[in-house]
Image (cartoon, rainbow, N blue to C red):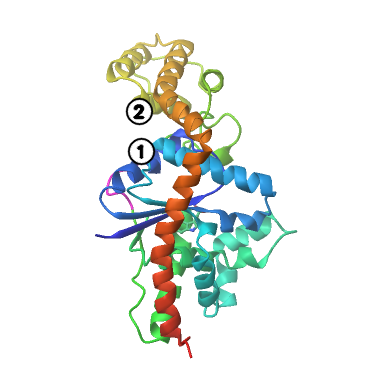
């Protein structure tokens, strides 16, 4: 059985794009592999959140992943900072991570540009911490998006370098994992092709959005002035609305509005009303679970404890072996 590990940013609520892009695959994957899912809260310190925000963000992510269907009895779902072994491996790996390669990292350069007043060392060594996350469980596969591929490459570099330095084959090479299926990409409501929180207010529908918010966002979604000829190709914003409809509505509903569009008889207001109702029907059970789990502190505490325990079992084994390889031996 292969070990799959996924690190989850502890900022930002889940939106429909996350749900269809990754979460649905995680839910399935947890039954087929040894899965570690963790919330990367050490990493989030690079932006100096307040203690309240830090805690609230971690909780929100934990709640939403559980609500979406990650089963903490099946997968190992944990919070990074509950596993101090990660910090030790980070220290050890940092001894053979070089300034030059860290400074050349695209994400470092980008973040340094974005927060010029806070170019802290944690930002520079972010890829080392991420390598520690991955190597601590000797993960084989890491589902990552395009923006994280360079980090994964660095995790391979650090693992291989350790192996070479100590003449061992201790760390396996982690590879990027794409789910073997064409990922469903959910477009934004602002006419752009990507649903994402960085794209601006109103672009994304969050799993935790209530009915009113969903209706408002969809009714305000960008459209166009309507088709003027039969079977006219769709503009991007209209294509987007149909794409979202494709994942939440019945095939009959989609066919109905396709036909109206092709006959130039479509009224986008009607289509949006229908789309809003179908999105609400789809997300309502998720939102209910989010509210329910979010109010159950005893359950959350149990989940976090169980996750930490399972993760530390694997992590402490790695640290013990790594210490021996390096030459730390008891007297
Ligand atoms: N850097 C990742 C992101 O921004 C999050 C992350 C931290 C991660 N550690 C990881 C992802 C280990 C995969 C494996 O999305």
Residue receiving disc 2: 247
In the image, residue 132 lies at what x, y percent? 47, 67
Mark 2, ligand 1, within 8 Å: the answer is no
Judging depth in this view, the residue of 18 and 87 nearest the camera is: 87
Residue sitting farthest toward the top: 265
Dot 1 or dot 2, earlier in sequence: 1
Cβ atoms at labels 1 and 2 below 8 Å apart: yes
In reply to whether residue 183 is colored magenta, the answer given is yes
| Residue 275 shown left or right of residue 46 in the figure | left
Chief SS of the magenta region:
loop
> Which residue does the image show at 41% across and 68% down from the upper left?
135
Report whether residue 205 is seen. no
Label 1 secondary element: loop
In the image, residue 17 lies at what x, y percent? 44, 37
Judging depth in this view, the residue of 149 and 12 nearest the camera is: 12
Q: Quadrant of the N terminus?
A: bottom left
> Which residue does the image show at 44% across and 63% down from the upper left?
312
Report whether residue 65 is seen. yes
| 163 is higher (above) or lower (below) than 151 | below
Image quadrant of residue 126? bottom right
How many residues crowd mark 1 within 10 Å: few (<14), some (14–19), many (20+)? Answer: some
Residue receiving disc 1: 184
| Residue 11 shown left or right of residue 115 in the figure | left
How many residues crowd mark 2 within 10 Å: few (<14), some (14–19), many (20+)? Answer: some
- The number of callouts visible is 2
| 213 is higher (above) or lower (below) than 297 | above
| 189 is higher (above) or lower (below) than 102 | above
Segment colored magenta: 178-184
In reply to whether residue 263 is colored magenta, the answer given is no
In the image, residue 313 lies at what x, y percent? 40, 64
Residue sitting farthest toward the bottom: 331
């Amino acid at each position: 059985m292969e070990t799959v590990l996924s690190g989850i940013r502890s900022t930002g609520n889940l939106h429909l794009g996350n749900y269809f892009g990754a979460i649905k695959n995680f839910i399935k994957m947890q039954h087929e592999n040894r899965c570690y899912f963790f919330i990367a809260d050490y990493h989030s310190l690079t932006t100096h959140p307040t203690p309240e925000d830090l805690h609230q963000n971690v909780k929100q992510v934990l709640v939403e992943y559980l609500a979406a269907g990650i089963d903490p009895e099946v997968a190992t779902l944990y919070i990074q900072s509950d596993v101090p072994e990660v910090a030790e491996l980070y220290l050890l790996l940092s001894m053979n991570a070089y300034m030059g390669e860290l400074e050349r990292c695209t994400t470092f350069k980008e973040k340094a540009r974005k927060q010029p007043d806070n170019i802290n060392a944690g930002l520079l060594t972010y890829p080392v911490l991420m390598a520690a996350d991955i190597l601590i469980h000797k993960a084989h596969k890491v589902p990552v998006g395009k923006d994280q591929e360079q980090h994964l490459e660095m995790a391979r570099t650090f693992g291989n370098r350790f192996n070479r330095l100590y003449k061992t084959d201790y760390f396996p090479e982690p590879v990027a994992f794409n789910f073997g299926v064409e990922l469903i990409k959910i477009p934004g409501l602002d006419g752009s092709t990507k649903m994402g929180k960085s794209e601006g207010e109103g672009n994304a529908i969050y799993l935790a959005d209530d009915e009113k918010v969903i209706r408002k966002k969809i009714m305000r979604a960008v459209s166009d002035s309507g088709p003027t000829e039969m079977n006219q190709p769709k503009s991007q914003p209209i294509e987007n609305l149909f794409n979202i409809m494709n994942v939440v509505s019945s095939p009959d509903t989609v066919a109905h509005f396709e036909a109206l569009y092709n006959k130039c008889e479509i009224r986008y207001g009607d289509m949006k009303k229908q789309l809003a109702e179908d999105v609400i029907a789809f997300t309502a059970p998720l939102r209910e679970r989010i509210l329910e789990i979010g109010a159950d502190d005893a359950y959350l505490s149990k989940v976090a404890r169980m996750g930490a325990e399972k993760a530390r079992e694997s992590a402490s084994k790695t640290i013990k072996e790594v210490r021996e390889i390096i030459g730390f031996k008891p007297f």
